[in-house]
């Protein structure tokens, strides 16, 4: 497959010294994780000690949280705000005992633990929280390196399957969707908007397509062209007018093309028999079943072909069927030498709209 890889190939020696250094690097990283977890555990223990011994009284000028925050700030030479942040994550170890155990063993780093805490802080049901904690604790140490967005999606996928209030929160947030324009006296206006995940992805792609519809000599930056494209949509235009100044600019004859987003969903969810969230393939974001039901009314559905009987592909680039399957299964880039197919993956579909 890589017989004709361009450039020079360098083979690293597997010397005893090299193995020793890699081992030291692994141990240092593990010790660093354990130390970070130990620091949070000590802060949590200190808070519980102060709370049990001092309690809470309405006539206190300083409550337990502020008192312990001051102690932590002084001990670690931090600002009070930073100390409060440490306390938040420290007390989360009590809410996520399984994940905390993995953290204290050094199997995950502090950033991953913080991401889990942030992504689960809205869970209020104790049984759901326990189920989420148990599932994360069992698999989180085996997760490969991922971007922040992909990591958040993995955690959200678990949360939404266990949290009975997740659907209500999504619906409540959707009820507040709006577009707000802020006044400006400088000839421009700022706006904020809340869109559905799919609507936002489609608008983002449309603005990019319109921004690219001009020729290379257009003097505007990409951001300026995207801004002008949003204004052009308001006047009913589907492309930008090129500002290169050339009377025979060929960009005006180039079509901008259509905008397509890809959503991957289980067949059971599409039919209303399941509650597994769908995924926006372009960004990896989750789509609750309720939003998926609205989307599928106008979307084109294409069953995902599982290449169970396909022979090995000897070429560098995979076939379309294999590429679609891997992207839909892993929702991102993966590093692996083989493809495993489970029976539960046979019914996934790609919904495009």
Image (tube, rainbow, N blue to C red):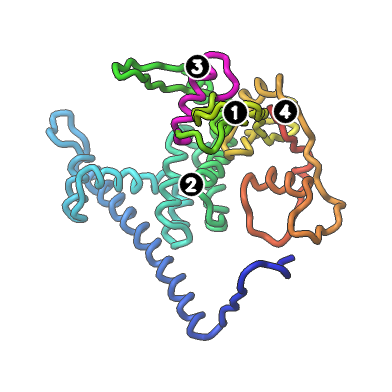
Between residues 142 and 52, which one lies in front from this camera angle? 142
Marks 3 and 4, the one that precedes in the sequence: 3
Q: Secondary structure at mark 4?
A: helix
Q: Nearer the viewer, mark 3 or mark 1?
A: 1
Q: Is residue 258 above or below residue 71?
A: above
Image: magenta residue range: 220-240
| Residues at marks 3 and 1 touching, judged by CB atoms closer than 8 Å | no
Marks 2 and 4, the one that precedes in the sequence: 2
Q: Is residue 227 magenta?
A: yes
Q: Residue 160, position in %: x, y?
A: 56, 35
Q: Is residue 298 above or below residue 337?
A: above
Residue 170's tag is none
Q: Label 2 belongs to which residue?
A: 148
Count of picture labels: 4
Q: Residue 252, position in %: x, y?
A: 61, 26
Q: Residue 75, position in %: x, y?
A: 18, 55
Q: Is residue 203 above or below residue 96?
A: above
Residue 175's tag is 3
Q: Can residue 203 be seen at all in this image of the molecule?
A: no
Residues at marks 2 and 1, CA–CA distance in whole angstroms: 45 Å
Marks 3 and 1, the one that precedes in the sequence: 3
Q: Label 1 belongs to which residue?
A: 248
Residues at marks 3 and 4, CA–CA distance in whole angstroms: 23 Å
Q: Secondary structure at mark 2?
A: helix
Residues at marks 3 and 2, CA–CA distance in whole angstroms: 27 Å
Between residues 277 and 274, which one lies in front from this camera angle? 277
Decide: few, some or many residues near mark 3? Use Cα within 10 Å; few <14, some 14-19, many ≥20.
few
Marks 2 and 1, the one that precedes in the sequence: 2
């Amino acid at each position: 497959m890589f017989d004709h890889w361009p450039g020079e190939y360098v083979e690293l020696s597997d010397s005893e010294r090299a193995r020793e250094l890699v081992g030291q690097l692994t141990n240092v990283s593990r010790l660093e994780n354990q130390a970070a977890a130990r620091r949070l555990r000590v802060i949590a223990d200190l808070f519980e000690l102060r709370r049990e011994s001092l309690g809470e009284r309405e006539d206190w000028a300083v409550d337990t949280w502020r008192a312990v925050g001051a102690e932590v700030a002084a001990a670690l030479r931090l600002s009070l705000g930073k100390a409060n942040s440490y306390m938040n994550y420290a007390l989360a170890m009590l809410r996520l005992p399984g994940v905390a155990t993995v953290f204290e063993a050094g199997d995950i780093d502090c950033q991953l633990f913080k991401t889990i805490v942030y992504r689960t802080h809205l869970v209020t049901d104790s049984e759901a929280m326990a189920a989420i904690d148990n599932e994360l604790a069992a698999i989180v140490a085996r997760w490969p390196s991922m971007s922040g967005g992909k990591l958040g999606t993995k955690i959200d996928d678990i949360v939404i399957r266990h949290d009975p209030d997740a659907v209500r929160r999504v619906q409540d947030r959707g009820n507040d969707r709006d577009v707000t324009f802020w006044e400006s006296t400088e000839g421009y206006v700022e706006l904020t908007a809340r869109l559905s995940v799919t609507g936002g992805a489609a608008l983002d792609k449309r603005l990019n397509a319109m921004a690219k519809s001009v020729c290379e000599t257009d003097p505007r930056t990409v951001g300026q062209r995207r801004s002008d494209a949003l204004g052009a949509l308001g006047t009913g235009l589907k492309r930008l007018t090129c500002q290169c100044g050339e009377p025979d600019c060929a960009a005006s004859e180039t079509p901008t093309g259509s905008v397509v987003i890809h959503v991957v969903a289980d067949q059971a969810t599409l039919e209303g028999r399941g509650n597994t969230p769908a995924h926006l393939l372009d960004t990896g974001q989750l789509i609750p079943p309720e939003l998926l039901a609205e989307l599928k009314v106008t979307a084109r559905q294409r069953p995902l072909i599982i290449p169970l009987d396909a022979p090995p592909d000897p070429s560098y680039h995979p076939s379309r069927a294999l590429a679609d399957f891997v992207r839909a299964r892993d929702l991102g880039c993966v590093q692996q030498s083989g493809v495993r197919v489970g029976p539960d993956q046979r019914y996934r579909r790609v919904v495009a709209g």
